């Protein structure tokens, strides 16, 4: 139990590293949570700060998931503990204690976790998102499909135990929960499409 709490805490602190917030403050002297959707994630960074800083935001959020989970996996050799760390990263990203628990939606970090656990799963998940974003221009739809498919990919490639599978389902469920407003807008036909070439 001590190991579980320790890696969960490490993951949470890593997740609290809010790339979009830091880039917004250092590069454009703004609090990104006061612009666009009010979200400190990749999609809002793209809309508010443009492609270059949006891509940098994605890289930072992706890497904190990848590096944290991979480090715990290499140090402990335990898939379960590495996934607990991954859950911590998502919780820290979504609900950062240093920013009044107002963070992002965790999709870029979830992709990083997927790559850390199995590069085949990561490639398949990223490919799915790219195809959906390219064809629909809805990042939210791609993110939701990722969350729905990731536990299936995880089961196919890893044949995990029940505890590991529950953790993956929990990570995916958090992604869906964070997109609850997007789901409502999609149902009403009011969701915004992404434009990679213009700042909002």
Image: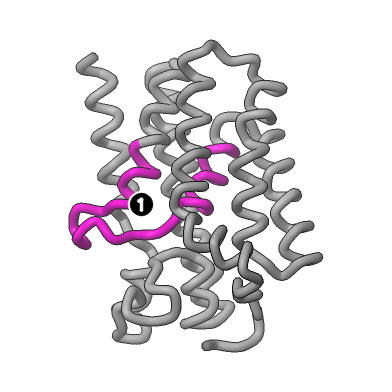
Residue at 32 percent across and 70 percent down: it is 22
Residue 108 left/right relative to 154:
left
The secondary structure that most of the magenta stretch takes on is helix
Is 118 or 103 nearer to us in this picture?
103
The image quadrant that residue 33 belongs to is bottom left
Where residue 162 sits in the image (x, y, percent)?
Answer: 52, 13
Residue 13 part of the magenta segment: no
Element class at badge 1: helix
Q: Percent from the top left, x then y, of residue 40?
A: 39, 66
The residue lying at 38 percent from left, 63 percent from top is: 19
Would you say 35 lies left or right of 181 here?
left
**Quick check: 23 above or below 117?**
below
Mark 1 Cα shell of 10 Å, populated few (<14), some (14-19), many (≥20):
many
Residue located farthest toward the front when viewing the structure as drawn: 188
Name the residue carrying label 1: 93
In x, y percent, where is residue 109? 48, 48
* Above or below, 82 relative to 9: above
Point 65% across, 21% down: residue: 155
Place of residue 149 in the rendered image (x, y in percent of width and height, measured from the top left): 67, 37
Quarter of the figure with the N terminus: top left
Give the residue at x 54% y 75%: 46
| Part of the protein shown in magenta | 88-115
Which of the two residues, 166 or 108, is positioned nearer the viewer here? Answer: 166
Which residue is most to the top?
161
């Amino acid at each position: 139990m001590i190991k579980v709490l320790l890696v969960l805490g490490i993951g949470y602190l890593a997740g609290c590293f809010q790339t979009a917030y830091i880039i917004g403050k250092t590069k454009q002297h703004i609090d990104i949570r006061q612009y666009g959707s009010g979200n400190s994630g990749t999609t809002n960074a793209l809309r508010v700060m443009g492609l270059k800083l949006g891509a940098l935001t994605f890289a930072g959020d992706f890497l904190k998931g990848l590096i944290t989970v991979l480090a715990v996996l290499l140090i402990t050799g335990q898939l379960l503990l590495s996934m607990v760390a991954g859950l911590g990263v998502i919780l820290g990203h979504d609900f950062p204690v240093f920013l009044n628990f107002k963070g992002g939606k965790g999709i870029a970090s979830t992709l990083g976790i997927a790559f850390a656990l199995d590069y085949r799963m990561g490639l398949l998940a990223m490919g799915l998102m790219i195809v959906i974003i390219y064809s629909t221009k809805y990042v939210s739809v791609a993110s939701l499909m990722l969350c729905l498919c990731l536990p299936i990919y995880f089961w196919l490639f890893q044949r995990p135990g029940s505890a590991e599978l529950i953790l993956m389902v929990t990570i995916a469920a958090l992604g869906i929960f964070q997109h609850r407003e997007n789901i409502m807008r999609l149902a009403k036909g009011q969701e915004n499409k992404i434009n990679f070439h213009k700042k909002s």
